[in-house]
Amino acid sequence: MKKLLAIGAMFGSLAILTPTAHAATATGTFDVLITLTPKCEINSTEAATGAVINNISLTYTSFQTAAATATTSFNVRCTNLLGYTLSLDSLGVTDDALDLAYTLAFTTGGSSGTGDGTSPGASHTVEATIAAGQGGTCAGPMPTTCDNAGATNNTRTLTVTY
């Protein structure tokens, strides 16, 4: 039995002298690289897909003494700090169905801006004006009204360049 105790004591003392295993760590660093493609949208939709902007509806009586005006408003949402300009395909048009000339102009919000990265974005307004004193063309028995539903040049295009 003494022999067994001696052997046990020997192994016990060896365990005390044996170093304990230590956990080791290593570290490294990395960057998170981000590529941002800035853009602008009209009315919070993809401009390339054809954003919907409300129509401008003008009412005019032949030879009226005051100009007829009407507007449409829309929002432009752009990446923060991204500058943009607005343009129309034409600022002066003579409707080919009613033979009435009208002009278009940017009013509220102007024709340029800088994005702030928020929704809905900056508000802009386009105003249409038919000058006073025009006769126009309207074929039909009286009393009647005519519209330009048959016009081939009544669609306007708004472009946001950024």
Image (cartoon, rainbow, N blue to C red):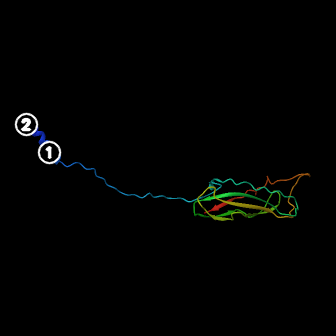
Which image quarter: residue 10? Answer: top left
Q: Is residue 49 left or right of residue 141?
A: left
The single residue placed furthest to the right in the displayed view is 142
Name the residue type under label 2: Lys
The residue positioned 14% from the left and 45% from the top of the image is 13
Q: Is residue 43 left or right of residue 153?
A: left
| Residue 124 on image: x %, y % | 69, 61
- State the residue in front, 57 or 116: 116
**Residue 151: which disc?**
none
In the image shown, does 157 or 33 lie closer to the viewer? 33
Circle 1: residue type = Ser
Give the SS element for disc 2: helix
**Quarter of the image where the N terminus is located:** top left
Within 10 Å of disc 1 (Cα), the crowding (few <14, some 14-19, many 20+) is: few
Q: Nearer the viewer, residue 102 or 19?
A: 19
x then y, percent, for residue 59: 83, 56
Tell whether 154 sits left or right of 118. Answer: right
Report x, y in % for residue 29. Answer: 38, 58
Task: Work out which residue is located at the far top of the displayed protein and give it.
Answer: 1
The residue singled out by tag 2 in the image is 2
Relative to 11, say whether 28 is above or below.
Answer: below
127 vs 113, left or right, is right
Gap between marks 2 and 1 measured at Cα: 16 Å
Q: Which residue is mark 1?
A: 13
Q: Which sits earlier in the primary sequence, circle 2 or circle 1?
A: 2
Quadrant containing the C terminus is bottom right
Q: What crowding class fits label 2: few (fewer than 14 Cα within 10 Å), some (14-19), or many (20 or more)?
A: few
Total numbered circles: 2
- Secondary-structure class at tag 1: helix
